[in-house]
Amino acid sequence: MPPDIEIIVGTYEEYLLGYQLIESSDDGDAGKLQLKQTFADRSHAGSIKSVAVQGPWVASGGSDDRIFVYDMRTRKQCQILLSHTGTVNTLQFSPDLTHLLSGSTDGHMIATRIGSWTREGDWKKAHAGQAVTHISIHPSSKLALSLGGDQVLNTWNLVKGRVAYKTNLKSKTTLGSQPDCLSWSTQGEHFTLSGPLNLEIWDIKSAHVMRRIKMPAKPICVTWLDGNECLTGLENGSIAWVSLKDEDDTPPNIIPAHEARVKVIAYLNESLATVSSAGEIKVWKVDKETRKLEEIASTNMDCRPTGLGLLDFSQFGNVRPVEQRIKVEKKPKAKSEPGQSAKPAGSRGFVTIEYEQDEKLEDEKEDDEEEEEKKEAVTTPKTKQKKKQAKKAPQEPEESSEESNSSEEESEDFSDSDSDGSSDGGHRKRKPRKRKQPPTPASKRKVKQQKKK
């Protein structure tokens, strides 16, 4: 049976990838294991810089200042953390699964409560305001180590939430200007720091270097098999096996692994996973007695890796989810036609609906008005009748056939405004005429009625 582990890899190409060991289905390769991709998620808007895996939780931090958290029991993205304003360089879950520690180029080191995902600690100047590059939590979840741009090693008391003591590494010429490979042993009695060509193993009791090992190439990554055995990935593609059981002068055991440098390395359940800078993933079977590695599967993901974590299914009883995808729950958006961008809803207007009954009522009113006009025409002289027609006439102009009739009415209307024409030397000032508008059905009916008269 293949080991119940899933390899989680973060890449420069913004992808978070998952691979799993399965038995080969080919007849000629029966019984052999192969790596099969289980998911590919591209939620980040920039390259992924750090990956953390603990229990059922997977977290990834990127250059887009965001942290995405996944619950692998349901295989869904469950939270997005926007705590930082800079690239998230390092992520680490506490072994007791209570907090997630994150460090960023903005100088902040933040502790987030797992479950509620609330910020419970924010050290704004953890390393004198400079970038926080590495965080490693002790197996007891009570201590943590951090490295930053100020070249100071901070030891944190996580119970009290403050720095217990600081160690200045500027005087350590063997570590260079950028110490790397900060990692606790499985029992928490030792931790590692690396320089250009050296790997240092520190003792927590004395707070001093207990072993300094010279390497044939620059150390890139470190993982512990137990309290005494340590594996280091080198820039030349090899793996250096270091044992504290050996004497101080004993050189490490060098094991060829990749053609390119070993970018990240992780160990879980007697299985070792390594990824090279060229994107080649290999899974090894570890033999502690003979200090040898046996390759059991390999593949190429065609991406440049940045972080690595191993997920153990046996911890939370998850069935092997082969060929599944991580689901990202999104809020439904308004549908828009292709080629058009979504527009915000405009102001609402009012719509009037006319029915035939309304038109009949209007016609009845017009007939009543005609009868009244006929009665008035008999009793009143023509001049008064014209004035009343002028008052009742609509403001809209009539058709060209009735322009002669409307001109007389217009002259009466303008007579009031031209009463002071004598003061202008006899020149009359007339108001500008209104623009002609297309006749409406109501105006056409009245024009026909006037013609009949």
Image (cartoon, rainbow, N blue to C red):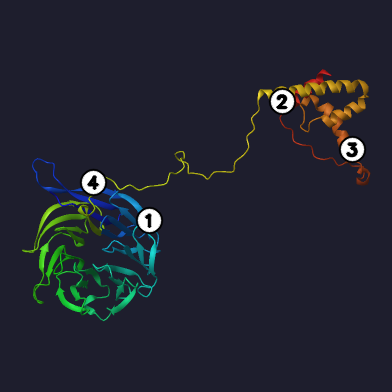
On the question of residue 306 being in view, the answer is no
The reply to whether dot 3 and dot 1 touch (C-beta < 8 Å) is: no
Q: Of circles 2 and 4, which is in front?
A: 4
Mark with earlier residue (1, 4): 1
In this picture, is 142 found above or below 39? below
The secondary element bearing badge 3 is classed as helix
Crowd tier of the residue under label 2, counting other residues whose Cα lies within 10 Å: few below 14, some 14–19, many 20 or above: few
Q: Of circles 3 and 4, which is in front?
A: 4
Mark with earlier residue (3, 4): 4
- Residue at which label 4 appears: 321
- Residue at which label 1 appears: 80
The reply to whether dot 1 and dot 4 touch (C-beta < 8 Å) is: no
Between the residue at mark 1 and the residue at mark 4, the CA separation in whole angstroms equals 23 Å
- Report the disc number at residue 46: none
Between the residue at mark 1 and the residue at mark 2, the CA separation in whole angstroms equals 63 Å
Crowd tier of the residue under label 4, counting other residues whose Cα lies within 10 Å: few below 14, some 14–19, many 20 or above: some
- Residue at which label 2 appears: 441
Between the residue at mark 3 and the residue at mark 1, the CA separation in whole angstroms equals 78 Å
The secondary element bearing badge 4 is classed as loop
The reply to whether dot 1 and dot 2 touch (C-beta < 8 Å) is: no
* Disc 4 residue type (three-letter): Pro
Between the residue at mark 3 and the residue at mark 2, the CA separation in whole angstroms equals 30 Å
The secondary element bearing badge 2 is classed as helix
- Residue at which label 3 appears: 415
* Disc 3 residue type (three-letter): Ser
Mark with earlier residue (2, 4): 4
Looking at the rendering, which quadrant does residue 193 occupy? Answer: bottom left
